């Protein structure tokens, strides 16, 4: 790839998150939105027009087979992440795939094996890992500024007034519905990145008639620490994360997964650090993808293949705890 050429993106799945991503893509200087794809041709054309994109496809195969695309952003429901990622990698595309990486560990492993076999970049789109507030707070924690981390408390909940069973990504089991996969992965990510894989998990859920979890609470036990986490579609919450150590604590402020600031409290002295994002904040994971592609790397050092495998392993443990089973 020529150093001065823009990296050409394609977007598969044109829901709300794809709109947010496309807006941020326009803010990245060396990025070009080359094509979009939806199974609804009108939706695809409207999306392309809105974001000054030349190509609008009505099938996923068409965009995957387009030789003028360098990297695909996959923003479809969870159940199609694995199949579309693998097909894209096999068709010479780099891939950024929305979280969760897949419905289970086995599918995630196949995706990563496809990345290695085809020597193409692949990353799960955990944009929080690249958020400036998170990265600076994370560095402070790693330097020991709040002492040894002993307790993490994090939630992610929003109220959904009406649910459907068929075709509603929040509750349709065929689409990988449920609060755990949709928003519960964020608190689990936070604990994993700071404390690793827990030694024990206790989790309880309330369910929709479809079998999808509407509300899931989790206790994570570590050798020398604990975490209490919550995800839900049936109430609002602070959407705040607190990391508590032996010397102080850090709050990732609301909404913590896309934080614009964090607060450091040591010996009852509190100070807020403002780090507003460029755009919504997808810009940072986009820039990470570009850097990795230019350096011919197939994974990011900040959110690696192994990181994604570890996280989905934790998610699987929670699923087993609450009895959440998706169709094969």
Image: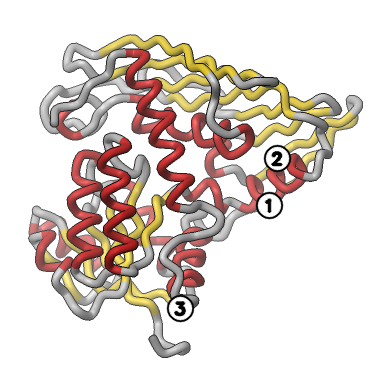
Give the mark nearest the N terminus, 2 or 1: 2
What residue do we see at 18% from left, 34% from top? 175
Report the side of 58 relative to 293 (left or right). Answer: left
What residue lies at 68% left-to-right and 52% top-to-bottom? 275
Query: Secondary structure beneath disc 1?
Result: loop
Distance Cα–Cα, label 3 vs label 2: 29 Å
**Helix, strand or loop status at disc 2:** strand
Closest to the observer, 79 or 318: 318
Q: What's the mark number on residue 275?
A: 1
Residue 293 seen in this snapshot: yes
Residue 305 location (% of width, % of height): 43, 51
Circle nearer the N terminus (3, 1): 3
**Residue density around tag 2, few if under 14, some if 14–19, many if 20 or more, within 10 Å:** many
Q: Quadrant of the C terminus?
A: top left
The image's colouring method is: secondary structure
Considering only vertical position in the picture, is 22 above or below 7? above
Relative to 68, say whether 311 is above or below.
Answer: above
277 lies above or below 308: below
How far apart marks 3 and 1 lie (CA) works out to 23 Å
Question: 62 and 238: which one is in front?
Answer: 62
| Mark 2 lies on residue | 262
| Percent coordinates x, y for residue 315 in the rendering | 39, 29
Q: Is residue 280 visible?
A: no
| Total numbered labels | 3
Q: Is 40 situated left or right of 199 in this image?
A: left
For disc 3, the neighbor class at 10 Å (few under 14, some 14 to 19, many from 20) is: some
- Which residue is identified by label 3? 30
Spot occupied by residue 9 in the image (x, y as percentages of width and height): 31, 70
User: Left or right of 34: which side holds 272?
Assistant: right
Cβ atoms under marks 2 and 1 closer than 8 Å: yes
As measured in the structure, the alpha-carbon distance from the residue carrying label 2 to the one carrying label 1 is 8 Å
Q: In this view, does 211 lie to the left or right of 104?
A: left
């Amino acid at each position: 790839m020529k150093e001065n050429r823009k990296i050409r993106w394609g977007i598969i799945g044109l829901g709300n998150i794809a709109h947010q991503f496309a807006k941020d893509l326009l803010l990245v200087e060396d990025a070009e939105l080359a094509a979009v794809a939806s199974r609804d041709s009108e939706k695809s054309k409207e999306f392309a027009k809105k974001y000054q994109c030349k190509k609008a496809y009505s099938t996923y195969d068409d965009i995957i087979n387009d030789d003028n695309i360098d990297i695909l952003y996959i923003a479809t429901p969870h159940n199609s992440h694995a199949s579309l990622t693998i097909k894209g990698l096999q068709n010479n595309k780099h891939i950024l795939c929305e979280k969760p990486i897949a419905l289970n560990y086995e599918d995630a492993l196949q995706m990563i094996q496809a990345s290695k076999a085809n020597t193409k970049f692949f990353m799960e789109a955990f944009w929080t890992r690249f958020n400036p507030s998170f990265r600076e707070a994370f560095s402070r924690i790693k330097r020991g500024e709040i002492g040894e981390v002993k307790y993490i408390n994090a939630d992610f909940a929003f109220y959904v007034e009406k649910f459907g069973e068929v075709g509603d990504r929040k509750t349709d089991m065929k689409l990988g519905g449920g609060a755990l996969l949709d928003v519960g992965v964020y608190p689990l990510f936070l604990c994993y990145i700071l404390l690793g894989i827990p030694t024990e998990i206790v989790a309880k859920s309330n369910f929709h008639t479809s079998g999808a979890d509407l509300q899931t609470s989790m206790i994570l036990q570590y050798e020398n620490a604990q975490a209490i986490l919550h995800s839900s579609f049936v109430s609002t919450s602070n959407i705040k994360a607190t990391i508590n150590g032996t010397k102080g604590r850090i709050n990732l402020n609301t909404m913590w997964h896309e934080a614009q600031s964090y607060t450091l409290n040591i010996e009852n002295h509190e100070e807020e650090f403002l780090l507003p994002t460029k755009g919504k904040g997808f810009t940072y994971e986009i820039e990470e993808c570009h850097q990795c592609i230019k350096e011919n790397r197939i994974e990011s050092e900040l959110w690696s293949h192994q990181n994604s495998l570890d996280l989905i392993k934790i998610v699987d443990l929670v699923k087993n705890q609450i009895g959440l089973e998706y169709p094969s």
